[in-house]
Amino acid sequence: MHFFSDNAASVHPRVWAALQAADAPDFAYDADALSRSLDEAFSTLFGTPCVGLWVATGTAANCLALSAMVPPHGAVVCHREAHIEMDEGGAPGFFTHGAKLILAQGDGALLTPESIAAVIDPIRPGVHQVQPHAISITQASEYGRVYRPHEVAAIGSLARTRGLGLHMDGARFANAVAFLNCDPAALTAQAGVDALSFGFVKNGGLGAEAIVLFDEELADTIRFRRKRAGHLQSKGRYLAAQILAMLEHDLWLANARAANAAAQELAASCTGRLLHAVEANELFVTLSDVEKTALRSAGFDFYDWPAPAGTPGAARLVTAWNTDPAHVAALARAIRNL
């Protein structure tokens, strides 16, 4: 019974069907009909003209977007526990040819205008210090916390005032929208986001993520950088097919709601154990080594997590769009019985 990561979740049957339907001759790279329809599909979803580009991984989506916003001598402001800092193996510096990450603080791995200002205000203008060019926020955050629309808008306002781009790492964007039950535009285009890394792999896709650009001028730069980085796949229609299948009839949102509901069911069994509010599909809970061993012996798999001071230990539990309800009920029962 796996609660390791939604990265390992199964591919949704409608995505498999879309891949099969795309298995016919068409133009190569991104000149096929499916790839060319992404702009319209995302513009409809977000209610504003935008550009949608496929890539194979979330790391590529994040770093290609940032590479178009930040020069090699510049910097990106992000949370100290952001994925681009902790889990992308130096890819931001590689794709940007040397740009720096400026690390800010924030509860639940969430940034605020104040925490951003705290790290950029001391930077002197001029060539002797690295100047910020963009802010990157993660929705939902590394601790499964969700930015509300007004919180994104406040960061967007700061970005505009300071002349900075705003990127959103949306690996679990679907889970955030499902939790808030809001218009996706309220978290992006209307809030001042320039580029969104829209995650699909965690949510039922096979191997396709999207870079959604609300600043359309960034698109041509990213197209060249995508090719140079080796991410312009010759059979791009298969990536586009996955994304379009997920967008059709809001499958992306239905899948996220299922994952979130499973997480909420587990959360109800974790009274007194939760380290963070459960707002998406991740739970961070206190578990001692003895308790972890007991759960694993009962057939439950999950990741250990660094334990905050004063706690006996911690673990991360992640649900997915297809997590078996029987497994959720069994784990909830086992946690209550510890």
Image (cartoon, grey):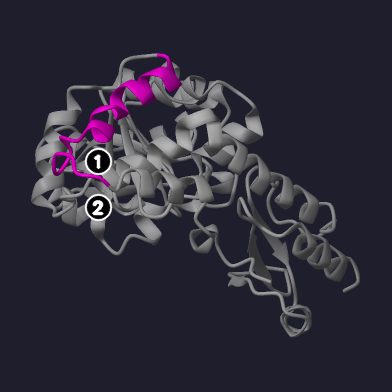
Residue at 42% over, 14% down: 47
Residue nearer the viewer, 291 or 110? 291
Residue nearer the viewer, 292 or 35? 35
Give, as a single range, the part of the protein colored magenta.
24-47
Residue at 14% over, 37% down: 223
Question: Which quarter of the picture shows residue 46?
Answer: top left
- Residue under numbered circle 2: 92
Q: Amino acid at mark 1?
A: Leu
Which disc, if any, is residue 99?
none
- For marks 1 and 2, the one nearer the N-term is 1
Residue nearer the viewer, 278 or 158? 278
Residue at 52% over, 50% down: 13
Q: Indicate the secondary structure of the residue bearing disc 2.
A: helix
Does the magenta portion include 38? Answer: yes
- Residue under numbered circle 1: 66
Marks 1/2: CA–CA distance: 8 Å
